[in-house]
Image (spheres, grey):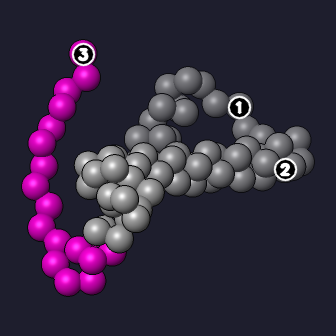
Amino acid sequence: MPRTTTMTVRLGGTLSDFVAANVGEKGSYENVSEYIRDLIRRDKDRIDREVFDRLKAELTQAFAAPESSYQPLTAAEVIARNRT
């Protein structure tokens, strides 16, 4: 069962005005909670994409390397190398 957390955020000035403009009849969101959840989801998606893009770049570079540059490693060596 997912855990629910209640958080309190204080906004003032232009940030508060910006949120108010995006919520309610004139905005894209029905309430502030919906808006904040969407922002968090978008940020999580952005981070996930960045992680995937870094992995993809590393794999692309590895597969482009000449075969002579490969070194045989045991599973223990790979684990030890990745701990640092």
- Residue range (magenta): 1-18
Identify the element where label 2 is drawn: loop
Of labels 1 and 3, earlier in sequence is 3
Identify the element where label 1 is drawn: loop
Viewer-closest of 78 and 59: 59
Amino acid beneath label 2: Ala
The x and y percentages for residue 35 are 35, 54
Q: Residue at x 47, y 52 (%)?
A: 42
Q: Which mark is residue 65?
A: 2
Q: Is residue 64 left or right of residue 44?
A: right
Q: CA distance from mark 2 to mark 1?
A: 15 Å
Res. 13 image quadrant: bottom left
Of labels 2 and 1, earlier in sequence is 2
Q: Are marks 2 and 1 in contact (CB under 8 Å)?
A: no
Q: Is residue 5 visible?
A: yes
Q: Is residue 54 left or right of residue 32?
A: right
Q: Is residue 25 left or right of residue 10?
A: right
Q: Which mark is residue 72?
A: 1
In the displayed structure, 9 sits above or below 5; it is: below
Q: Which secondary structure class fits the magenta region best?
A: loop
Q: Are marks 1 and 3 in contact (CB under 8 Å)?
A: no
Viewer-closest of 83 and 7: 7
Q: Residue at x 84, y 50 (%)?
A: 65
The mark total stands at 3
Badge 3 density bin: few <14, some 14–19, many ≥20, Cα 10 Å: few
Res. 9 image quadrant: bottom left
Amino acid beneath label 1: Pro
Q: Which residue is mark 3?
A: 1
The x and y percentages for residue 62 are 77, 46
The x and y percentages for residue 7 are 13, 49
Furthest-front residue in this view: 25
